[in-house]
Each structure stands twice: as C-alpha cells, then as structure tokens.
C-alpha cells in the first residue's frame, strides 16, 4: 500500500468516526456569549470621514469664541485688499513693440505670417498685413526682452529668413532662423 492510499484510508476512518458520534446540544446562551466577546469591526478612516460629512452636524459657539475668529477674518480680507491694490512693481517684464517687415514689391505672396519662438511657431498667431504704400508685409507685435528666433512663412509653405536681420542661427533642419534682440526699450539692440 502506498503512502497516498494510507492517507486516504486514514481520512476515511476519521470521517466515519466523526459521523458516528452522537450530536451534542449547545449550552444555553453560548451564541450570545460568543457574539458579546467579539469586537465590532471599526470602519476605515475614509468611511468614517464620509459618514461625518453625510450626517448633519450641529455647531454651538459663544460670542466670545466668535470675536477672535471674526477679527482674524477681517484682518486677512484687509491684507488681501491691500495686496491687490499695490502699484505694479518694476520687476514685471515690460513688453516692447517690435516691427516685422518683409518687402514684396511684386506682390508675389498672397499671405505672410511671422512664426517664431515668441509665438510657439504658430502662423495663425502672427498674420502680417500688406501695405500698398510701403509695398511690404508688416506686423507689429509686443515681445518681452531677450533674443527671439523667427522666420516668415509665405503662402503657408515657404520659410523665408528676414534679410534685414542682423544675425541668424542654424535651426538644425537646414534653415537659418533670423534673430531679433529686444532689450525692453527697442528692437534689434545688441
């Protein structure tokens, strides 16, 4: 006989012995004593918080308790009001008006935009207008101080660097980006 067969025979013998035992009656009050000995399950912190929010709460306070709180609230509101009415500090970056001009004497372009680092290279943000008297496409924009790379986008397809730009920079894709320096007073300051 194998070990597995011995184990199965032993299990069957134990099961028969348990089934042949007489059924005993539980003592009176046994279930109540067992249940009384068990601690109730405490709800989770999230459940307790949610129940606190759902249940109606009553607040009681005395006028002497409210006075300090009201005083602090009025002081905070006054401080906020004073802070919002402060004059504009000189730390705020001032924008400078710059002018982009692309000559087009033969009126070959039907639309021109300026795309650059200042408008996230989006053509719709800086559409130029054509001046018949100047025979050029013109755009005036407000830019913060610093150097700004840009190109003209002609007819939505052709990238043209500004021939009037004092400096250019290779963009890594075979194009030369024009660079405009803004010093906070005027454009093209070096």
Image (cartoon, grey):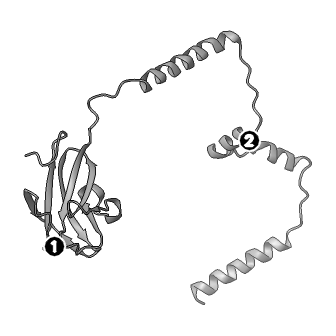
Residue sitting at x 68%, y 45% = 43
Q: Position of residue 55 (x, y in %)?
A: 76, 38
Q: Residue furthest front?
A: 133
Q: Residue furthest bottom?
A: 1
- The residue to which callout 2 is attached is 54
Left or right: residue 30 versus residue 148 is right
Q: Position of residue 54 (x, y in %)?
A: 74, 41
Q: Position of residue 172 (x, y in %)?
A: 14, 69
Q: Earlier in the sequence, mark 1 or mark 2?
A: 2
Binning the other alpha carbons within 10 Å of mark 1 as few (below 14), some (14 to 19) or many (20 upward) gives: few
Say above or below: 165 vs 187. Answer: below
76 vs 53, nearest the viewer: 76
29 vs 4, nearest the viewer: 29
Say above or below: 52 vs 114. Answer: above
Binning the other alpha carbons within 10 Å of mark 2 as few (below 14), some (14 to 19) or many (20 upward) gives: few
Asked which secondary structure carries label 2, the reply is helix
Residue sitting at x 62%, y 43% = 45
Asked which secondary structure carries label 1, the reply is loop
Say above or below: 184 vs 24. Answer: above
- The residue to which callout 1 is attached is 173
Left or right: residue 159 versus residue 65 is left
């Amino acid at each position: 006989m194998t070990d597995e067969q011995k184990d199965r025979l032993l299990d069957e013998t134990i099961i028969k012995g348990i089934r042949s035992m007489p059924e005993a009656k539980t003592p009176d009050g046994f279930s109540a004593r067992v249940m009384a000995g068990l601690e109730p399950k405490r709800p989770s912190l999230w459940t307790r918080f949610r129940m606190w929010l759902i249940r109606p709460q009553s607040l009681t306070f005395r006028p002497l308790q409210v006075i300090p709180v009201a005083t602090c609230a009025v002081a905070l509101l006054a401080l906020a009001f004073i802070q919002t009415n402060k004059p504009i500090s000189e730390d705020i970056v001032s924008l400078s008006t710059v002018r982009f001009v692309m000559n087009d004497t033969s009126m070959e372009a039907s639309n021109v935009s300026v795309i650059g680092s200042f408008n996230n290279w989006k053509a719709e943000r800086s559409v130029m207008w054509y001046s018949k008297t100047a025979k050029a496409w013109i755009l005036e924009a407000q830019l913060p101080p610093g150097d700004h790379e840009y190109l003209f986008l002609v007819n939505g397809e052709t990238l043209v660097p500004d021939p009037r730009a004092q400096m250019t920079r290779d963009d890594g894709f075979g194009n030369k980006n024009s660079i405009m320096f803004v010093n906070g007073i005027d454009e093209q300051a070096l």
